[in-house]
Image (cartoon, helix red, strand yellow):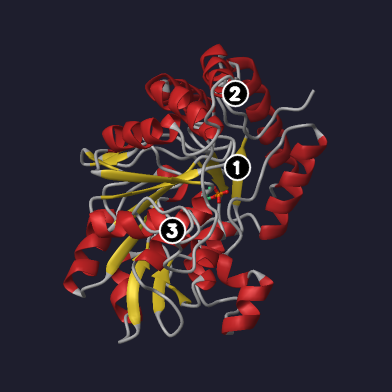
Amino acid sequence: MQIYLSRPDITEKEIAGVVAVLRSPNLSLGPKLTEFEGALTRYVGRRRAVAVNSGTSGLFLSLLALGIGAGDEVITTPFSFVASATSIMMTGARPVFVDIDPVSLNLHPDAIEAAITPRTRAIVPVEVFGNPAGFDAVCEIAERHGLSVVEDSCEALGSALHGRRAGTFGTLSVFGFYPNKQITTGEGGAILTDDEALVDRCVSLRNQGRSAADRWLLHERLGYNFRLSDINCALGLAQLARIDEIKAARAHVARWYQEMLADEDRLIVPAAPDGVELSWFVFVVRLAESFSPDDRDRLLDEMRRQKIQVSNYFPPIHLQPFIAARYGYGPGDFPVCEQVAARTVALPFHTQLSEEDVAFVCGVLRGVLDTLHR
Ligand SMILES: *Cc1c(COP(=O)(O)O)cnc(C)c1O
């Protein structure tokens, strides 16, 4: 039997919510869209939300709403899911990477200022693995330089830094609801902001560039179809209503891993940093520096052979072949990111893992480490 890397947490409540929409006349742009957006604003603590069909669409629309495009530069992290950088490229702007903090694994605040040029318009910081550490410093730098912040909170729903929720740091903040996230809509995402003018632009861009006025076939700008159906929104509403329960169940699994791996000095085991309330997204351990990148890859292969799904979150974005080729990035450009990325092992992490499953994963992991270490 496979042990899955991630699994959604779906109950009869989610199923009933979806079925109710299917029995209704409105499968899209109906009442569940407005309800889901309202529930998100209340949970995160922002004035407005615009639900869209993916986190990537949310990042792209946020940048477009700020007027970012060809000729502009946007500072971001090379250690993330690729969409935080490709959404910048989609606008025609250039992603400018800076290295990460070796502890938080987020964009290093001290590295940002050296990368700012007259073309810089915004910063896209990412709460990697759900951790908002350093985001107060990033916002302070952005403000000092008159830059917008598009907060990629796609991994951080429910996290907080010194009591301030993830999703409240950006000029616009974006969540993603793919099935491996804390809550899912199947596919989906949302933009949160306090700025009504930005909301109007995002709403129009999401729906074929339509005007806010009630004229269905008046299109006032180049737009997209990034709408999120009421079926997805009903799923999201049922999930968001259960977020505290889901967060607690995930924290429980994280604690099992932390306890079972506490004595393992061949690994860096994740923990919530001081001042951070961590809504666990993934459980990523890192091999000690004495292990080579090849050791890590052999470990992943061997665990997969034993039917344990694992992953190498995240390969450096600047070394993705099409990005390295387009902008001339290469190995050695962001050494902290590269050193970290070569040694990560994302372990199975979801609410349906039992204590026995976690013990089995830890046992296999230790066994493979024994065969690797010299
Ligand atoms: C999940 C995720 C996204 C959005 O992904 P979609 O699949 O487009 O919803 C964006 N950025 C990060 C860092 C993510 O983890």
- Mark 2 and mark 1 lie on one chain; the one further toward the N terminus is 2
Residue under numbered circle 2: 22
Q: Which of 232 and 81 is in front in this view?
A: 232
Q: Looking at the picture, which amino acid does disc 3 mark?
A: Arg
Q: In this view, does 264 lie to the left or right of 191?
A: right
Q: Nearer the viewer, residue 257 or 249?
A: 249
Q: Which residue lies furthest to the right in this view?
A: 305
Q: Which of 13 and 357 is in front in this view?
A: 13
Q: Residues within 10 Å of mark 3 (few under 14, many from 20)?
A: many
Residue drawn 44% across and 30% down? 32
Label 2 SS: helix
Could you say where residue 130 lies in the image, as x and y percent from the top left? Answer: 42, 43
Residue drawn 60% across and 16% down? 354
How far is disc 3 from disc 2 in space, using C-alphas?
A: 26 Å
Residue under numbered circle 1: 346
Q: Which of 130 and 23 is in front in this view?
A: 23
Could you say where residue 68 lies in the image, as x and y percent from the top left? Answer: 39, 74
Q: In this view, does 130 lie to the left or right of 145?
A: right
